[in-house]
Image (spheres, rainbow, N blue to C red):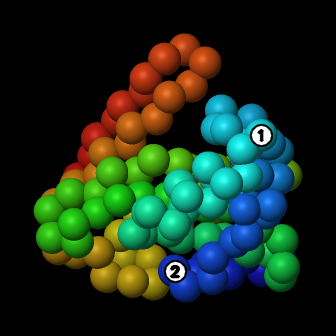
Amino acid sequence: MNITYSFEKRPTADEIIELYDNTGLPRPTYDKERIQKMFDNSNLIVTAWDEDLLVGVSRSITDWVWACYLSDLAVRHDYKNEGIGQTTYKPDKGKSWRPINGFTFISSNSHGILSKSWI
């Protein structure tokens, strides 16, 4: 398994929908236009690829100097427990995020709102 990570390579809406459906992440995958807008309006997206297969993604909004709000973190079921999720959001992995003071993960799932913060 040769996983590559990218800040520049953007997945298509179809690739995102397929990944989210695979992971069970509760997002509006029935609405391709909305998924596309979610990604178009995020300013920090890190993708993980196994050749041409999207295997992981983190989608965030940040001001690049203080805070980063992680909206989505998804890893394909067959690739879990390989450190892919951690690598897509942790500082020191390929791009310096050192100016960011902390991360907050805010998401909704079938049980309501989930929030977790770390520095």
Where is 94 relative to 82, above or below? below
- Front one among 97 and 11: 11
Quarter residue 56 falls in: bottom right
Amino acid type assigned to the residue bearing label 2 in the image: Phe
Q: How many marks?
A: 2
- Front one among 44 and 31: 31
Residue reaching furthest to the top: 111
User: Residue at left 56%, top 25%?
Assistant: 109
Q: Residue 116, how many percent across, how many down? A: 34, 35
Could you give the CA–CA distance between mark 2 and mark 1, rounded to whole angstroms?
26 Å
Q: Which residue is mark 1?
A: 30
User: Residue at left 45%, top 84%?
Assistant: 94
User: Taking the image as drawn, is residue 107 in sight?
Assistant: yes
Which SS class for mark 1?
loop
Where is 79 relative to 9, above or below? above
Label 1: few (<14), some (14–19) or many (≥20) C-alpha neighbours in 10 Å = few
Q: Assign the N terminus to one quadrant of the image.
A: bottom right
Q: Residue 114, how many percent across, how many down? A: 43, 27
Amino acid type assigned to the residue bearing label 1 in the image: Tyr
Which SS class for mark 2?
loop
Label ID, residue 102: none
Q: Is residue 13 left or right of residue 118?
A: right
Where is 44 relative to 86, above or below? below
Q: Is residue 35 left or right of residue 111?
A: right
Q: Which residue is mark 2?
A: 7
Contact flag, marks 2 and 1 (Cβ < 8 Å): no
User: Residue at left 44%, top 63%?
Assistant: 42
User: Residue at left 49%, top 17%?
Assistant: 112
Comparing labels 2 and 1, the label whose residue is closer to the camera: 1
